[in-house]
Image: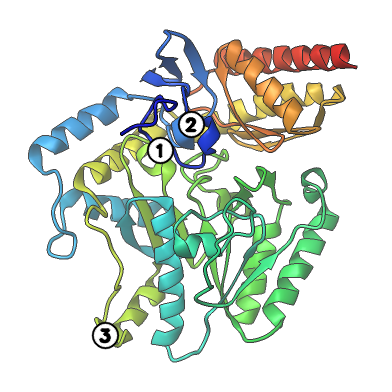
Amino acid sequence: MRNPASSSSLWRPWTPITQQGDPLRIVEARGTRVRDADGNWYLDGISGVLNASCGHGHPRLIETATRQLRQLVHYDPMVSSHDPAETLASRLAGILPGELNETVLLNSGSEATEAAIRIALQYWRNIGEARDRVITFETGYHGSTYLAQQLSGLPFTVSEWARPFPIDHVGIPMTPREVRTAESADALIARFAEALEKDTPAAAVMVEPLLGLGGCVVLPEGFLARLRQLCDRHGSLLILDEVFCGFGRTGRMFGFDHDGIAPDIVTMSKGISGGHLPLAAVTVTSPIKESFKHEPIAQGLRYGHTTGGHAVASAVANTVLDVMADEKLVENSATQGAELVEGLRKLESSPLITDVRGLGLVVAIETDGPESGEAIANAAARAGVMTRHERGVIRIAPPLTISSDETAEILDAIRSGVDLATAAGNRRT
């Protein structure tokens, strides 16, 4: 029997039990807007779950999903292929650089991480080398499944279970504002070099092009290119987690495009299907896939899920690529993101704001603490703009379809929020 004190039987993840009751309830979404159960409309500054890159309910995506539902919903990916998945894999090979030609389709970013790590470790076994050590950022985030949680040193994702293989976490010894300098790039590369040189040879280095849940930290220009060179020098695979950054979020198709490099393995999700259906992808170089001819048990990848590469989700993803090209969403992400950062940086004179940073349409406002961050985010919501606040950092990542007028609307709401939070703080003192 339900506890009378509880208003819902739904157990929401990542939310304290004491905060489960009477949550905001979103009942409708159109384009860049969402409506709650009380009839209030908000400009969606967080893209649903950071994945509604083409906006909510895009008519072309709905049309594609409906058509595919009528033709073929899905079929066992271990028994048969189908056209939507084959087409998507081919198109990903066409837009990804280098030899990134081989794609396995899954359901979520966490699954993509699991697959990428399994592939990387098995690759070394396939070619007869004993490598199983993985190096990541301590404040990186790669998902919430068992292997994915092992890769992160963030306090809310730390796993209590034993690690299945050695993992080295590289810390960032400076503030997010300081990270963006050339001197910080030198310091970070030195730390990764130290990690690669110690102990046994590393199987892989896995990082995000921008540290999402780790505070929306923008890495120094050229860092990924130098990390690519470092991995090449030590013979380690470079895995880039594009789950959040990929498909135009940073103002380029992929986050690593800013540095003009190609990883050995790339993980993708969120924007790949515009948030309309669950989908993820892991793409690897041709030599990595070819090595699985020597996998001792199945001569192939021993990992997959019932709905991986779902036909409807894959069909929608193909239309997402069409929409992104036709509506120039990558270019719009770069333009609107620059406007947003420029406008928000005018707020850095406020004692409540310690940093404004961003890349494309992922922008972060760092405040002087969680109390200020929560006050500003709540005030923005009352003004009709939804943002996401975590540990003193307000994250803004609207759909890539956002207009200049809507960018101005976000700026007005945040300015108002800062003014109200400042006034409330002055009254307390």
State whether residue 322 is above or below residue 253: above
The reply to whether dot 2 and dot 1 touch (C-beta < 8 Å) is yes
**Residue type beneath disc 3:** Ile
| Mark carried by residue 173 | none
Model colouring: rainbow
The image quadrant that residue 66 belongs to is top left
**Residue type beneath disc 1:** Trp
- How crowded is the residue under tag 2: few (<14 C-alpha within 10 Å), some, or many (20+)? some
Looking at the rendered image, the quarter that the C terminus falls into is top right
In terms of sequence position, does the residue under pointer 1 or pointer 3 come before the other?
1
In terms of sequence position, does the residue under pointer 3 or pointer 2 come before the other?
2
Q: Residue at x 80, y 43 (%)?
A: 177
Q: Which residue is mark 3?
A: 297
Q: Residue at x 43, y 43 (%)?
A: 270
Q: Is residue 208 left or right of residue 65?
A: right
Q: Residue at x 25, y 28 (%)?
A: 62
Q: Nearer the viewer, residue 161 or 253?
A: 161
Q: Which residue is mark 1?
A: 11
Looking at the rendered image, the quarter that the N terminus falls into is top left
Q: Tag 1, which secondary structure?
A: loop
The reply to whether dot 1 and dot 3 touch (C-beta < 8 Å) is no
Q: Nearer the viewer, residue 13 or 44?
A: 13
Q: Is residue 185 left or right of residue 136?
A: right
**Residue type beneath disc 2:** Gln
In terms of sequence position, does the residue under pointer 2 or pointer 1 come before the other?
1
In the rendered image, residue 184, in percent from the top left (x then y), is placed at 81, 56
In the rendered image, residue 12, in percent from the top left (x then y), is placed at 43, 37
Furthest residue in direction top, as rendered: 39
Q: Which residue is mark 2?
A: 20
Question: Label 1 vs label 3: CA separation?
Answer: 40 Å
